[in-house]
Amino acid sequence: MKKWTNRGHEFDALGKRFKKKPEILLIGDKSECERIREKLLFLGVKIDISPIEQFKTIGNIQKFILGYRFKSKTILVVDSNPYESGLFISGIEKNFSLKRNEDIFWINDFLDYYLSIFAVYVAEKIYFSSNCFICTTVCNLNCKNCLNFKPYDRNLQHYNIDSLKKSVDLYFSVIDRVGLFHISGGEPFLYPHLNELLTYIGEKYRDKIDILGTVTNTTVIPDDTLCEILKKYNIRVEVDDYTKTIPQLKNNYNNLVKKLKEFCIWTQINVAGVNWKWFSVLPSKKDWTNATEEMLIKKFNDCNNPFMEFKKDKIHLCCYSEFAAQAGLITQNSTELYDISKFNNKNKKELIEFRLGYSEKGYAEFCKYCNGLPVINPTAEVPAEQASGKLSWDKNTPCQLG
Ligand code: SF4
Ligand code: SF4
């Protein structure tokens, strides 16, 4: 459970283990390992690669392990298949005195979680797996189950470009490297200063960002200037395909995808949910307002939301809790944000703990109302179903279904 009990020292045991194994050994497909090595160069530690071909049998592994000075190495298995990686790792665990998630890791687990701990303990660097960064709450769709609560928000706005730039400067004065910096909305392509913002981030901080991304609902075709910027800074555009629910978007969708292709822009098509099913975080399906602290901490833990927003100098424990506050649905609680304008180098480990979900209360204010992400809240809604006009919800009567 992620309520702080030993603030600044929550990961000391694992950190101590990493310090004894400060080098990295990547095992896997050679070109994939090279790609991962690039990502990890910011650590400034020695990184070796061993192609997977050497590991076809446990005998080969034994020869390798015995012949290799692996003791100083944290081992990462670079394979996109979790099942195959799991088998490989359990083979090694069974035959050698190595432990999963202490000595040997599946690469995705490492990048999503453990790298932040490794980076701060071994290299004194701050690594975040991701952050979302909102430039506007304005959107020209009105999805009933919008995770930014657009239909509920009576104060939609484009954020001030100078403030956004200042925030970005502050963020990168503290964070050494981020896996995904996601510029989101609202509909980002409606933001009037998007070109300026992307150019600013691209010019000053692109080398600190693994994936610089944005997203669009396909209603706006970017002009050539924006396309050049997206291409120049290798910005990934996520295209939310809502055409099944909103067939009128088909033309725009096709034209957008065609244009992104023409400009050789990194594009990722998102088809919502599983089997075209989405989920609703509001209205509440259950009244959690009288839930005990223990129940809320468990809910936060089970929901396991990996997404945090960075806004106005602050990292927010759960982006959806912040979006709900921005939409005027709840009042923000100061224990669920981390003000990095007050950061000093002594707080590095504490900041990493916060980014990995630790906080004073161990849950977010919105956990008292929100149904949670699909892991605790099965998908049953039509993605991008449009609401007619504004929606209302009152936190004093949270269960307003029907
Ligand atoms: S497209 Fe829909 S889900 Fe996305 S911001 Fe707009 S209203 Fe929300
Ligand atoms: S239950 Fe809702 S508010 Fe709580 S962590 Fe999950 S998404 Fe965030």
Image (cartoon, helix red, strand yellow):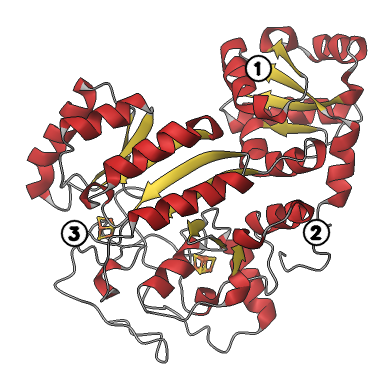
Whether residues under marks 2 and 1 lie with C-beta atoms below 8 angstroms apart, the answer is no
CA distance separating discs 3 and 2: 43 Å
Q: CA distance from mark 3 to mark 1?
A: 44 Å
Say whether disc 3 or disc 2 marks the residue closer to the N-terminus: 2
Mark 2 highlights which residue?
Answer: 8
**Left or right of residue 365, residue 200 in this image:** left
Judge whether 400 appears above or below 182 on screen.
below
Residue assigned mark 3? 141
| Image quadrant assignment for residue 92 | top right
Vertical placement of residue 324 versus 288, above or below: above
Q: Earlier in the sequence, mark 2 or mark 1?
A: 2
Residue 358 sits in quarter: bottom right
Mark 1 Cα shell of 10 Å, populated few (<14), some (14-19), many (≥20) = many
Q: Position of residue 294 (x, y in %)?
A: 69, 78
| Disc ID at residue 28 | 1
Q: Find the distance from the CA under tag 2 to the CA under tag 1.
A: 34 Å
Residue type of the residue flagged with mark 1 = Gly
Task: List x then y, in percent, for residue 269.
Answer: 30, 36
Q: At 57% from the left edge and 19% from the top edge, which residue is drawn?
A: 35
Q: Nearer the viewer, residue 61 or 232?
A: 232
Task: State the residue at coordinates (55%, 53%).
Answer: 306
Regarding mark 2 in the picture, which secondary structure is present there? loop
